[in-house]
Image (cartoon, grey):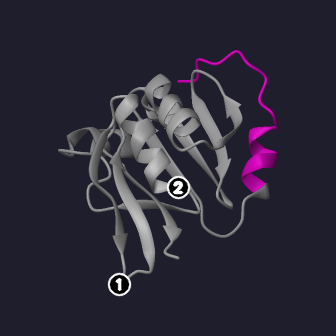
Amino acid sequence: MKKSSKKPFMAASDYGQSLAGFTVNLLTADLARALILHRDVLRVELLHEDEDLLIVRGYGADWMVHADHTYDKHPLLADTRSAPRRGAGVELRLHGCDPDGAAKRAREQGFKVLDGPRDQPDHGLREAHIIDADGYVWVPDVPLL
């Protein structure tokens, strides 16, 4: 069920048809909290924000965060709600996002930092693992010098 009365930055059908390659859609129980993580912690560009949806761009990618209520007629919502934690076993990596700054901002905003920031020489990266309010694990990383 859509709640938004805001005019989208682009018609949904036009935006959908503009996407290519790999994209991610996330469901959230708390869109306002997701907004804080994306805008204030990960520092991505907001292309669109309303009561139903965030469309963000950062680090060479676009992705969408949908409020649970927008999937009220979709079987994915019931499946998501029955899981012990959304996003378990999935890393959402943001290459080029400073892990030290993101981890600091995450702690300041009350998000859990699962690991790091720390150097991962085997990967050639410095990274942190941040758990958002829905349990998704975001991994900002930068190349080791």
User: Is disc 1 placed on a helix, strand or loop?
Assistant: loop
Q: Report crowding for label 2: few under 14, some 14 to 19, many 20 or more residues within 10 A (C-alpha).
A: many
28 relative position to 118: left or right:
right
Q: CA distance from mark 2 to mark 1?
A: 18 Å
**Residue visible at 81% across and 47% down?**
14
Q: Overall secondary structure of the magenta stretch?
A: loop
Q: Residue at x 46, y 35 (%)?
A: 71
Residue 2 position, x and y percent, is: 58, 23
In the image, 118: left or right of 24? left
Find disc 1 in the rendering and name its residue. 122
Look at label 2 and name its amino acid.
Asp
Q: Residue drawn at (64%, 19%), measured in percent from left and top?
A: 4
Q: Examine the image and state in which quarter residue 85 appears.
A: top left
Relative to 74, 6 lies left or right? right
User: Residue 1 location in percent, x, y?
Assistant: 53, 24
Instruction: Name the residue beneath numbered marker 2.
Output: 98
Q: In the rendered structure, does residue 65 fall within the stretch colored magenta?
A: no
Q: Secondary structure at mark 2?
A: loop
Which residue ends up furthest to the bottom in the rendered image?
A: 122
Residue 70 visible to the viewer? no
Q: Position of residue 66 (x, y in %)?
A: 52, 36
Residue 71 visible, this orientation:
yes
Magenta span covers which residues? Answer: 1-17
| Amino acid, disc 1 | Asp
Mark 1 Cα shell of 10 Å, populated few (<14), some (14-19), many (≥20): few
Among the two numbered marks 2 and 1 on one chain, the one whose residue lies closer to the N terminus: 2
7 within the magenta span: yes
Q: In this picture, is 50 found above or below 10?
A: above
Q: Residue at x 49, y 23 (%)?
A: 32
Give coordinates of residue 31: x percent, y percent.
48, 27
